[in-house]
Amino acid sequence: MSAFVIAVPAKGRLQENAETYFARAGLKLAKPRGAREYRGTVVGVPEIEVAFLSASEIAQQLAAGTVHFGITGEDLIRESIPRADAHVVLLHPLGFGHATVVVAVPQAWIDVRTMADLDDVATAFRLDNDARMRVATKYVNLTRAFFARHGIVDYRIVESAGATEGAPAAGTAELIVDITSTGTTLTANALKIVDDGVILRSQANLVAARGARWDAAARETARLVLDRIAAYDRAASFREMRTRFKACDDALITEARERFGVETPFGGPTSSGMLTLHCPPDQVHALATFLRGHGAASVVVGPLDYVFACENPLFDRLEAAL
Ligand SMILES: Nc1ncnc2c1ncn2[C@@H]1O[C@H](COP(=O)(O)OP(=O)(O)OP(=O)(O)O)[C@@H](O)[C@H]1O
Ligand SMILES: O=P(O)(O)OC[C@H]1O[C@H](OP(=O)(O)OP(=O)(O)O)[C@H](O)[C@@H]1O
Ligand SMILES: [Mg+2]
């Protein structure tokens, strides 16, 4: 039996979140031959093989189709896979690994606020120095595409593997393109983000490889994985609220739906007036107030582990793309 392979970050900042995410979705990863083994399994789902790789390797293997699913940052996907959408499907943003790829220049460049200002500087730099302004980055492809979109041609890229933010002070580049999350590193290096210089807002994504072997068995495994993830996601976006009161009718439920984003997994109230509602977490108190205002004596609220629905929107997206 050919395995269904899911690539999961083995190290770095996405690792822990990725494992936690799968575990919460009911897909507990196991490394049966010790922590240094780079192939693992999912407890209770023998048809899945887990490949533990670095975030950048995951992007490469998705492009090559040697894994079916992978978790990695959108920045790595967009940077390392030309025409990424032809090779992979970004099925689902995962809510962690947030970071932004930005153009940053020395704070001392007070005249540079926008990409248009940067274009002026690039032209002037070329005339004054008889050389092109240097941009240090490891995001070579993202930088080229973004600068081209802004009509900037007078620059050249200096490839940087690490400590990119130090390049301007070290004199190896005039400006940089790099990833930032808190902004601490940029500030520490006396750099500032160009106002319209945000190239990409990235986060970890569940990504499918178009080029993987998508036979019937693989599709069935994908359906199972995505069913669990969708059920977990739905559960995480709601609290369950239960109540019972006479005055509850369809008009009241319609109002609750419109005002609070409520869903009714089992339809309207039962004959005895029992009602189950799924409510966005930040609307729980407002909805409880609303229900009591209409005669509910008590409203009980609890968390949900999974909400399995008939629809599987993640799988539908995959099927439509393959
Ligand atoms: N502050 C941050 N700095 C760098 N990457 C971040 C940050 N926050 C989130 N990320 C995301 O983490 C991913 C990179 O993770 P990681 O550094 O573990 O992988 P890698 O670059 O393949 O490994 P390594 O850096 O060891 O070569 C990227 O998708 C990136 O967007
Ligand atoms: O905006 P901040 O919160 O300061 O984070 C951004 C910094 O974090 C990352 O470096 P990392 O520490 O991962 O080292 P690396 O360059 O080796 O990946 C990234 O390359 C930036 O340098
Ligand atoms: Mg890194």
Image (tube, rainbow, N blue to C red):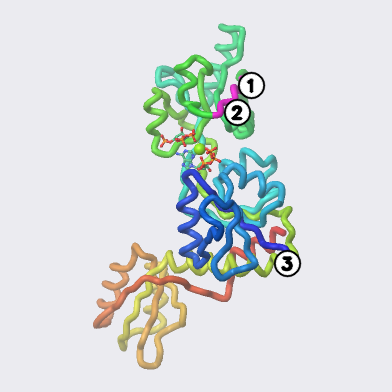
Tell me if residue 197 can be seen: no
Looking at the rendering, which quadrant does residue 227 occupy?
bottom right
| Disc 1 residue type (three-letter) | Val
| Disc 3 residue type (three-letter) | Met
Specify the segment rendered in magenta.
Answer: 156-161
| Disc 2 residue type (three-letter) | Phe
**Label 1 with label 2: CB-CB less than 8 Å:** yes
Mark nearer the N terminus (1 vs 3): 3
Mark nearer the N terminus (2 vs 3): 3
Give the spatial CA distance, label 1 vs label 2. 7 Å
Q: Is mark 2 on a helix, strand or loop?
A: helix
In this figure, which residue is indicated by the disc labeled 1? Answer: 153
Tell me if residue 294 can be seen: yes
Mark nearer the N terminus (1 vs 2): 2
Q: Which of marks 1 and 3 is in front?
A: 3
Query: Residue 60: where, in percent of width, then height?
Result: 66, 44
Q: Does the residue labelled 3 lie within 8 Å of ligand 1?
A: no
For residue 23, which numbered disc appears in the image? Answer: none
**Is 307 on the left-hand or right-hand side of 78?**
left
**60 over 118 or under it: above or below:** below
In this figure, which residue is indicated by the disc labeled 2? Answer: 147
In this figure, which residue is indicated by the disc labeled 3? Answer: 1
